[in-house]
Amino acid sequence: MKLLDIVRLILGNLNRRIGRVALTAVGVVIGTAAVVILVSLAIGLQKNANEQLYGIGDLTQIQVSPTYGGQVMMASGMGGGGGGGSSGSGVQQTALLTNPALDGLRAISGVVAVIPRDYLMSSLTLKFHRLESGSNVIGIGTDDLGQLGLEASQGVVSLARGTIVIGPMVAANFYDPNQRPGQATPAAPDLYDQNLTFVLIKYDQNGNEIRKTMTYKVVGVLAQTQGESDWSIYLRLDELKAMNEWAMGRRINYNKDGYSQVIVKVDSVDHVLDITNQITALGYQAYTPQSFVQGINNFYLILQIIFGGVGAIALLVAAIGIANTMAMAILERTREIGLMKAVGATNRDVLSIFLGEAAGIGFLGGLGGVLIGWLAGQGINVIALVYLAQQSASQGGTPPSVAVSTPVWLPIFALVFATLIGLISGLYPALRAATLVPVQALKYE
Amino acid sequence: METSLIQISNLTKHFQMGGTTVRALDGVDLDIPQQSFTVVMGPSGSGKSTLLYLIGGLDRPTGGQISVNGERLDGMDENKLALFRRHAVGFIFQSFNLIQSMNAEENVGFPMQFSGIPPKERKRRSKELLEQVGLADRGRHKPGELSGGQQQRVAAARALVNNPGLILADEPTGNLDSASGVGIMQLLSDLHHSGRAVLVVTHDARMVRFATHKVFLLDGKIVSEDQYHRASLE
C-alpha cells in the first residue's frame, strides 16, 4: 500500500468521526499547550537570570587570590601533624602571587592575559573644585583597560603616569561638604579631561593626621558594566604601590609578598571553569562568576524538566483518551477490518492505518497545542513585561527583555512528542485490529 | 478433460463452543473445475459458509488440504494469504459489506488501494465496472442511497476489481427481494460466461438452474443430491 493512499485513507477515516476525534484531540491540545507554556516560562526565567548575571562581570575573567598558609578549621576536627602541611589535612600551603607565579598562570593554555591589581590601603578624599568624594581606587598592572573588557564612553581606556580612568558612577558620588540645609544639591560634575585631587590620609603613632596630596588627570570615563568598574578609579599599579608604601610606611616587594589579586583573562567562556580548576589545583583561590552561572543554569534545567513533566502528565491523560477512542473505533469498525482483509489488506496495512489514525489525533492535538501554547506565551510576555518593567522602574535596574521564551526546537519537539504519544496509545488497539481473524471480523455484530 | 481449480481433500474445520466441539466440516473431499458455476447448497449450519471462507483463505482449516489454482492454502502465512485474497478471489457477501461513508465508486476502488494502483487508474476502473454491473449513473451515490439490489451490484463490481479468476458469493440473494435476487443471479451467470469460476453458497433453489456443478452439504459432509432431497423431506 502506498504511503499517500494510507495518509488519504487515514484522513478520510478521521474526518468520518470528526466530533469524536476533536474531543479526543482536545486532551492532547491541553497537554501540548501546557508543555510549551511551562517550558517556555522556565527558559524565559533562565534567560532573565542570565541577563542579570552577565552584569556581574565579564564571564571570561577569573579572579585569583593568594593562599596564605596556616591552620584551617575542618569539620572533621583537628588536622594531623604539622609536617609541612603537605598532607592537606587542615593545613593549607602558602601560594603567593609573585611574578614567577604569574608567569606560571600565563603558561596555562587558554589564558589570554594575567593582570595583577591592588586596592588602595589608605583613607582617601577626592577633591574637585569645592566638591569632595570617596571612591574605590584600583591599581592595575596593565596600561590598557581594554584587556579587562572595559570600554570608554569618553576619552580612552589606556593609562599613563599621572592619569586615571574613572567609572561612570564616580562623578555622581561628589558632594559639597559645605552645603547648607535648603541649598540645592550640586549636579554631578563632568570630570572628563579634568584634574582630580587625591588627598591621602594616615595617622602617626601619636594620632596626628598626615596628609599627602596628588593630582591626576581623568583621561577616560568607562562605559557602564553594572559591575565594580562603574564606581572605581583605575590608575597604574606602580603609582598605587607608591601610595600604599606611603600609607604603610614600608616598601612593598611584589616578588616577595606577591600581589593581593590577579585577574586572569581567558579566551572563551567555555574554558573558564576548566582553567579555574587548574588554578585552584596550583594552590590559589580562584573565583569566577561562571561557576555561579553554571549552577543557576543547572537549576533552570531542572525547572524545565519539572515544568515539562507537569505538561507531560496532562499528555499522558490525553494518551489514555486516544487509546480509548481507538479501541472504540476498532470495535465499531470490526466488520470493516474484516472487509479490508477480505479484499487483500495485509496485517501490516491494517496496523499502519490504525496506528496512523492514532498518531493523526496526536499530531492534530499537538498542532493545536503548539499554536495555543505559543500564542499564550506571547500574551503572557506582553502582560508580564509591562508589570516587570513597572517593577524595575520603581526598584531600579534594567527591566527584563523577555518573560516567556519559546525556542524553535520546543514547538517541533512538542509536536513530535504529541504524535509519538498518539502512536504509542494506538499501538495496542491497532495490533488487535491487525491480528483479527478475517472471518470472525466479518461476522462481528 | 477439465482441469481443477479447487482441490479439497479430507478438509475438517472444528469449533469449540463452550465445552463441546462443533464439526462444521467433517472430512470434505471436493474437486471444482476451472470456469465452473458451482452452487453449494445446504441448510443453516451445514458448513457451507465455512467451506466458502476456507476456499477464500479467510479462515484456516483444522485439518486436510485445500489448493486453489495449484496453491496450497493450508500452511500459508498471513501475508501470503492476504496476497492470495487480493489477487485470486473476489468476495460477495450476504450483507454487502460496503463502507457507508464511501460512495459507490470509492467502494469499488477500495481494494485497489492495497495493490498500490494510482488514484486515476482506480477511478477509471471503478467507473468501468459500475457500468458493467449496470450502475454507471450511481457512482456518486453512497450505499444508503441505493437499493439492496444496487448495493449488491456495487459489491459484485468490487469483487471484480482486481480481476480475479474465482468469485466467491456467500448467500448473495439472502438480503434481497425476489426480483433483485434474480438480477444478481443473472449477473453472476454473466460473470461465469465471461470466463470466471463462480462458487455460490446459497439455499435459494433458483440458483441451481445457473449451475454447472452442484454440491450438497449436510452436517459438514458432502452428500448426493438424492440424499439431500430425502433429508429435506424428512
Image (tube, grey):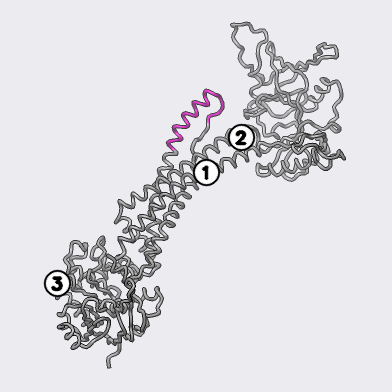
Q: Is residue A91 left or right of residue B9?
A: right
Q: Secondary structure at mark 2?
A: helix
Discs 2 and 1 carry the same chain letter:
yes
Q: Which mark is residue A15?
A: none
Discs 1 and 3 carry the same chain letter:
no
Q: Which residues are the magenta region?
A: A378-399
Q: Nearer the viewer, residue A245 or A217?
A: A245
Q: Is residue A276 left or right of residue A329?
A: right
The Cα–Cα distance between marks 3 and 2, rounded to whole angstroms, is 86 Å
Closer mark to the observer between disc 3 and disc 2: 3
Label 2: chain?
A
Label 3: chain?
B
Query: What main secondary structure does the magenta stretch of the protein show?
Result: helix
Question: Which amino acid lies under the numbered mark 1 shown in the image of this protein?
Answer: Ile
Q: Quadrant of the C terminus of chain A?
A: bottom left
Q: Which residue is mark 3?
A: B180
Q: Which residue is mark 2?
A: A54
Label 1: chain?
A
Which residue shows up at 82% across the image and 14% down it?
Answer: A203
Closer mark to the observer between disc 2 and disc 1: 1
Q: Secondary structure at mark 3?
A: helix
Q: Are marks 2 and 1 in contact (CB under 8 Å)?
A: no
Q: Residue B71, image x and y in percent?
A: 37, 83
Whether residue B86 is visible to the viewer of this picture, yes or no, is no
Q: Residue A272, image x and y in percent?
A: 68, 41
Q: Are marks 1 and 3 in contact (CB under 8 Å)?
A: no
Q: Which mark is residue A306?
A: 1
Q: Nearer the viewer, residue B86 or A412?
A: B86
Q: Does A440 sit above or below residue A267? A: below
Q: Nearer the viewer, residue B13 or B80?
A: B13
